Image (spheres, rainbow, N blue to C red):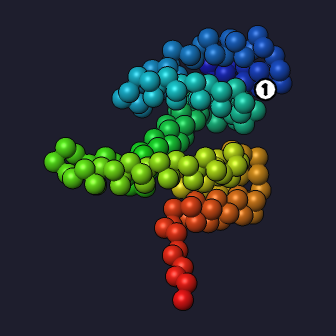
């Protein structure tokens, strides 16, 4: 009986009935919250997953068919968002690792002063090269090379086409590479 009631409430909420939406959320909010907390060991991540899950549930109420219980359907939605959160966290960690490799860290006190100066100069050159890019080219470069997003994800995030992302990425990489290469010395004969 409860499953049928949830299905009817979901249908009415999908049709725009705010009272049905509020009733459905009031019935299941605690269970959804517990579910997200079980999925995520970190409370901050659990709160993020809870928020994303609730948004997705509200947007997709029309797709709930009532074949399974409402909480089972929500569990699938929550698990999907938890997986996305993990992938995003992994991309951010990978970005930090790539950025650390790109921008040479300052050597420790035991290293020579020349190494520290070279690392500082390289860091400044990389920063200047990135600042010389246009905002959209820089956003594409950061999304693809630092965050590890796919071309499709970057295109969607920046409201571009995939070919535009590829073109801007190529142009940004070439410009940064050119600015980081040492100048060519020309000797007069």
Q: Nearer the viewer, residue 66 or 99?
A: 99
Q: Is residue 87 visible?
A: no
Element under label 1? helix
Which residue is depicted at the point 62% across and 19% down?
2
Of all residues, the one furthest to the front in this rendering is: 189
Q: Residue 3 falls in which quadrant of the image?
A: top right
Residue ID for mark 1: 14
Crowdedness near tag 1: few (<14), some (14–19) or many (≥20) residues, C-alpha within 10 Å: some
Q: Residue 1 falls in which quadrant of the image?
A: top right
Q: Quadrant of the C terminus?
A: bottom right
Q: Residue 7 falls in which quadrant of the image?
A: top right
Q: Nearer the viewer, residue 52 or 123?
A: 123
The location of residue 158, given as percent across then percent down, is 71, 45
Of all residues, the one furthest to the bottom in this rendering is: 189
Q: Is residue 147 above or below residue 170?
A: above
Of all residues, the one furthest to the left in this rendering is: 110
The location of residue 171, given as percent across then percent down, is 68, 63
Which residue is depicted at the point 72% across and 36% down?
63
Which residue is depicted at the point 72% across and 17% down?
21
Q: Nearer the viewer, residue 96 or 105?
A: 105
The location of residue 173, given as percent across then percent down, is 60, 62
The location of residue 159, given as percent across then percent down, is 76, 46
Q: Is residue 120 above or below residue 17?
A: below
Q: Is residue 116 visible?
A: yes
Which residue is depicted at the point 38% across and 48% down?
120
């Amino acid at each position: 009986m409860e499953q049928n009631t949830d299905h009817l409430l979901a249908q009415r909420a999908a049709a725009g009935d705010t009272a049905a939406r509020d009733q459905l959320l009031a019935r299941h909010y605690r269970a959804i919250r517990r579910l997200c907390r079980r999925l995520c060991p970190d409370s901050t991540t659990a709160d993020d997953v809870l928020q994303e899950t609730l948004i997705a549930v509200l947007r997709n109420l029309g797709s709930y068919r009532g074949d399974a219980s409402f909480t089972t359907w929500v569990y699938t939605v929550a698990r999907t968002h938890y997986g996305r959160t993990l992938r995003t966290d992994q991309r951010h960690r990978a970005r930090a690792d790539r950025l650390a490799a790109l921008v040479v860290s300052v050597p420790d006190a035991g290293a020579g002063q020349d190494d520290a100066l070279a690392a500082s100069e390289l860091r400044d050159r990389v920063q200047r090269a990135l600042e010389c890019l246009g905002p959209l080219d820089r956003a594409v470069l950061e999304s693809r090379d630092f965050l590890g997003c796919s071309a499709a994800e970057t295109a969607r995030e920046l409201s571009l086409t995939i070919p535009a992302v590829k073109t801007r990425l190529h142009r940004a990489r070439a410009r940064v590479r050119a600015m980081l290469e040492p100048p060519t010395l020309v000797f007069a004969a």
